[in-house]
Image (tube, rainbow, N blue to C red):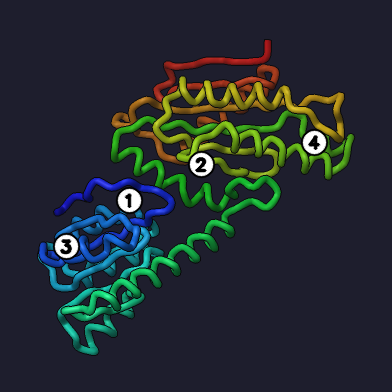
Amino acid sequence: MSETQPNPYTETSPVVLLVDDSQFVHRLLEARLRSESIVLSSAEDGKAGLEIAQRDEPSLILLDLDMPVMDGFETLRELKEDPRTRDIPVIVLSGMNSSQDKVAAFDLGAIDFVTKPFELTELRARVRSSLRMSELLRMLAQKAHIDGLSGLYNRQYFDEKLSSEFNRTLRHGQSLSIAMIDIDHFKSVNDTYGHPAGDAVISGVANLIMRETRSIDIACRYGGEEFVIIMPETDPNQAQLMCERIRQGCEHLAWSRHPARNITISVGVAGTGNTDTVTITPEGWVEMADKNLYHAKQSGRNRVVTTGLDGTHISLAQAG
């Protein structure tokens, strides 16, 4: 069971990863936790469990201590040292019952320690409690990463997600694009109509971006009147189409504070259809999108400029 079981990832079904070398324990918990409305993912050693946790970021990990390849203590240590997995709650399941083992597990970051053979009713209660705590922590973390004015993710969240999303996409050899968006002549909106009007423009453009992007996209307020979108599984042509929809939508928005003045945006996109050949860094990718944004500004604004990472794909879209 070194691979995850087929599972329907949904917002209402949290994923629980069981890392244990006993197939009996896997069969037992799969049967007894079925009524808990969770998706049970499985690994039979610490190394495989660590890889699955890094890839899928489950809501909770049930971790055995005595396992081949990589034992539970080393697995727990690596889980808590990795930014991708350090916040995932871990319940240790172990046949070892010494105080020393318990102290070591808690010192490494476990939130609970259950001794085998465990009482299944108690284990179910502990799983439910840990999942509730995990959800509350997720909600608090998400709130801390939301920009108050735009409702999009903030710059801090973008900086945290850029590298992990880049590496995840690279591992799977998938397409990926990044868009930098800037509101044209934004300073003159503030100067002419006041800062409340400028705030309304930022909020309105952000709402448009949220409507046009997908659930897998990561849309953030980059700073001031700039936005950035990470678009997984999206090649440059697809990214350009999405950004062109956003550009056209912005051009036709009505503004109550200045109905006679339209608001436009300029967009720079950098992307690739296959990350297998990518040698650029995540920061270099953003820099290329920013250069395309500058090109869009210098070319007259209100347009989308898109290039592939190899420099061969260049396109220009604009009003009219």
Contact, mark 3 vs mark 2 (Cβ under 8 Å): no
Residue name at image x 42 percent, y 35 percent:
232
Name which of mark 2 and mark 1 comes first in the sequence.
1
Q: Vertical placement of 182 versus 312: above or below?
A: below
What distance separates the C-alpha of mark 3 from that of mark 2? 35 Å
| Drawn side of residue 137 relative to residue 103, left or right | right
Residue annotated with mark 3 = 26
Of marks 3 and 1, the one in the foreground: 3
Q: Nearer the viewer, residue 165 or 284?
A: 165
Classed neighbour count for the residue bearing mark 1: other residues with Cα under 10 Å, few (<14), some (14–19), many (≥20)? some
Residue annotated with mark 4 = 187
Residue type highlighted by circle 2:
Ile
Residue type highlighted by circle 4:
Lys
Residue annotated with mark 2 = 218
Name which of mark 4 and mark 3 comes first in the sequence.
3
- Percent coordinates x, y for residue 251 in the rendering: 71, 23
* Quadrant that contains the C terminus: top right
Classed neighbour count for the residue bearing mark 2: other residues with Cα under 10 Å, few (<14), some (14–19), many (≥20)? many
Of marks 4 and 3, the one in the foreground: 3
Q: To which quarter of the image does residue 303 belong? A: top right
Residue type highlighted by circle 1:
Asp
- Percent coordinates x, y for residue 69 in the rendering: 12, 62
